[in-house]
Image: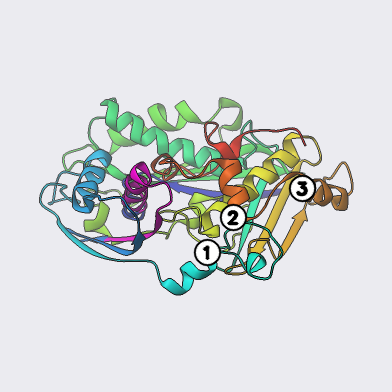
Amino acid sequence: MRKLFTSESVTEGHPDKLCDFISDSVLDACFEKDPYSRVACETVAGKGQVLVTGEITSKADIDIEKIVRNAIKEVGYDNSETDIDYRTCKVLINISKQSSDIALGVDKSYEDKEGESVNSEGAGDQGIMFGFACNETEELMPLPISLAHKLSRRLTEVRKSGEISYLRPDGKTQVTVEYEDDKPVRVDTVVVSTQHLENVDLEVLKKDIKEKVIKAVIPEKFLDENTKYFINPTGRFVIGGPLGDSGLTGRKIIVDTYGGYSRHGGGAFSGKDPSKVDRSAAYMARFVAKNVVANGYSDKCEIQFSYAIGVAKPVSVYIDTFGTAKIPEEEIIEKINKTFDLTPRGIIDKLDLRKPIYRKTTNYGHFGKPDLSWEQIVKF
């Protein structure tokens, strides 16, 4: 049976990703000075203005406006006529401290209060988190999102290196993969939309993107004479970034995870410290799912955790191996429960999450990057 599946990615200059990057930059700045900071930072950007809002409880004294401007500069935005200028944009700050009601449940878990001696913080919120892995790629990620991220990253590389000097920071990619009997066999369609300078010949742009981006990223074995290419299909993309469309932290949750190939619990990542299980438990779910596949227990694995606010232990642990398990799923769950501490403190300690590591997670997916702790392979 043949079928098509599509995933998309965006560049670091996409307005939503710009906001994610600013929020994670604020988080890292807090963690550099206080690893026990509580941060829930949201950013909105549009039409020459950036608003940073949310709750921060920290001993760190940080200059949020400077962080915002440096993040925008790092992405490459310096023109208020076409996107946003880090030097002249208006920066608004509306930050308060974490609610004392939430802090009560996080500081001391329900189990500790009930005398169960878990000795752990409670979850920072209720929620469900999914993790996924499959053996389609070396990094154990689905092929469509893996290729889409690599295309977006390549767009940024050729822009910043000057190899394609007329590109601007905003851009999106999309890859459709054809599967035969659940195995990827070819790339059916590639879509790339990239912001560019006013005076660029669009035929030159299309040729450059096809040769220097697409063919530099997608293995030749997946491309054939029937592969379709849509490069800047609207024809013109000069106005971009927060001038072309508003940006908001947490609006690219499918880009951040598995490209729609696996389910999503709905919680965003960027700007949140690891006491928020939306982020930390999703990282742990990926860690566990990847290690189920890496250890040969299945070819595909989806994990779900659920939490109640203020409670340390997960309310439920669910696994689906889609019929690819080499041992019974009940045995896999037993191994997981014996091996991994799934309380917020256990996750934070295992994955070493109280460090300023979050800016490097923001772009091109939070999963599949080999240097991240939740991507490491362990025997269990």
Amino acid at circle 2? Pro
Disc 3/disc 1 C-alpha distance (Å): 24 Å
Disc 1/disc 2 C-alpha distance (Å): 9 Å
- Give the magenta part as a residue range: 20-44
From what the image shows, is residue 60 above or below residue 126? above
The residue singled out by tag 2 in the image is 344
Mark 2 element type: helix
Q: Do the residues labelled 1 and 2 touch (CB within 8 Å)?
A: yes
**Residue at (47, 28) in percent of width and height:** 215
* Image coordinates for residue 132, horizontal then vertical, percent: 66, 48
The residue singled out by tag 1 in the image is 106
Pick the residue in front: 40 or 101.
101
Amino acid at circle 1? Val
The residue singled out by tag 3 in the image is 336
Q: Quadrant of residue 264?
A: bottom right
* Image coordinates for residue 237, horizontal then vertical, percent: 26, 49
